[in-house]
Amino acid sequence: MTDARPDDALATLAASFAAGDERALAEMYTRWSALVYTLALRNLGDVSEAEDVTQRVFVSAWQGRGRYDPERPLPGWLVGITRHKIADALAARTRDRTVEAALIATAEADEGLHQPDLAERLLVADELARLEPVPQQVMRLAFFEDLTHAQIAERLTLPLGTVKSHIRRSLDRLRSRMEVTYDAH
């Protein structure tokens, strides 16, 4: 009978979670956050990104609890979500690097060939001005003072993941704005 108790406790936890009990989510986090974090860290190789993925996994699990089948093993379900979030983080990393490389290549090409036209410079300046103060400061340090993410985090006393998130969101916003502008021409 003692062998059935852990299974019963897990089944009760799964049912409570599916029913929307926040204490069940807290228990899940206590039990499996180290597993989620370890998987993320092994795949991403970055502490900050692994922490972000861990948080996203549990937020996603909570938001998707209506789709969770309590008959399914809860740890396996979390590992599945973790794999998806790791893939998302890797894709975001690739997009960030691609956009950054394109910006750098464009800037280097423009230095040698011609100055960026006034409309482009105004568009970029306008987009930077539309950012909230902290993301704006992060972007200025990254692109005008050429600081690394770690240097920006240190200078602004922000977590490295927060700096990366600000840059990613700001670049996405700038890219979307540039696409709209160029599609209109």
Image (cartoon, grey):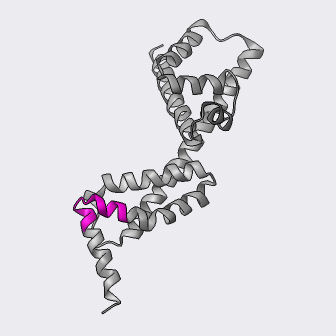
Residue at (66%, 38%) from the top-left corner? Answer: 150
Is residue 81 covered in magenta? Answer: no
Residue 48, compared with residue 166, is above or below; it is below
Residue furthest out toward the front:
157
Identity of the residue furthest to the left in this view: 19
Q: Quadrant of the N terminus?
A: bottom left
| Relative vertical location of residue 56 with respect to residue 168 in this rendering, above or below | below
Q: Report the side of 65 relative to 97 (left or right).
A: left
18 relative to 142 in the view: left or right: left
| Image quadrant where residue 120 sits | top right
What x and y, as percent, mark residue 147?
A: 69, 29
Q: Residue at x 51, y 64 (%)?
A: 34
Q: Main secondary structure of the magenta part?
A: helix
Percent position of residue 184, x then y:
44, 15
Residue 18, given in percent of the width and then of the height, sits at: 25, 63
Write down the region rendered in magenta: 16-27
Q: Residue at x 53, y 48 (%)?
A: 89
Tell me if residue 182 comes above or below residue 34 in the rendering.
Answer: above
Confirm whether the magenta stretch covers residue 18: yes
* Left or right: where 30 falls relative to 137: left
Q: Where does residue 100 sit, x and y in percent of width and height?
A: 63, 32
**Residue that extends furthest to the right in the rendered view of this protein:** 112
Quadrant position of residue 116: top right
Q: Is residue 119 above or below residue 169?
A: above
Q: How many marks are shown on the rendered structure? A: 0
Farthest residue toward the top?
118
